Image (cartoon, grey):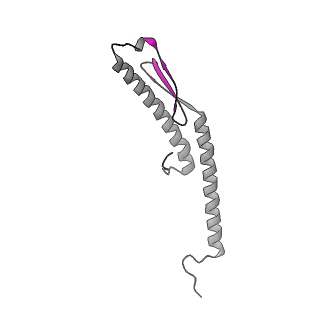
Amino acid sequence: MARGVMGGGKNNNNNFNNLMKQAQKMQMEMEKAQKELEEKTFEGQAGGGAVKIELNGKKEMMSISIEPEVADPDDVEMLQDLILAAYNLALEKAEEETQKKMGGITGGMKIPGM
């Protein structure tokens, strides 16, 4: 009797088992990398360091530092711009590190939420 394309022979079972092992290994590596990323901090600065923002690996803001000389009540817009710039730089660093770390595990394949 002829077997179909998915014949189900021993070779197919070995291929499936190998694929599952690789997937489990990748998942473990991703979990490890994610934990490492969560422990890192990323800093963004603006205004020559007058505004500093620190994010953790979960991209949550951990701290913000503002030098008194940039807290001019007559120029609130400048302070807002500096805060945004510092935050965006810190976020960019966190994103780059995440992509670098996860890209090495996934072979560059984009995974939503990473």
Image quarter for residue 51? top left
Q: How many marks?
A: 0
Q: In percent of the image, x 41 and y 19: which residue is there?
A: 47
Q: Is residue 66 magenta?
A: yes
Stretch in magenta:
45-68
Image quarter for residue 74? top left
Q: In percent of the image, x 44 and y 18: which residue is there?
A: 48
User: Where residue 96 sits in the image (x, y, percent)?
Assistant: 49, 38
User: Relative to 9, is 112 above or below?
Assistant: above
Residue at the farthest front position: 73
Q: Is residue 83 left or right of residue 74?
A: right
Q: In percent of the image, x 34 and y 15: which residue is there?
A: 75
Of the pair 19 and 67, the residue shown nearer to us: 67
Q: Is residue 58 left or right of residue 69?
A: right
User: Where residue 60 sits in the image (x, y, percent)?
Assistant: 51, 33
Residue at the farthest bottom position: 1
Residue at the farthest top position: 69
Q: Is residue 59 magenta?
A: yes
Q: Which part of the image, by quadrant, shows the N terminus? A: bottom right
User: Where residue 34 sits in the image (x, y, percent)?
Assistant: 59, 42
User: Where residue 104 sits in the image (x, y, percent)?
Assistant: 56, 46
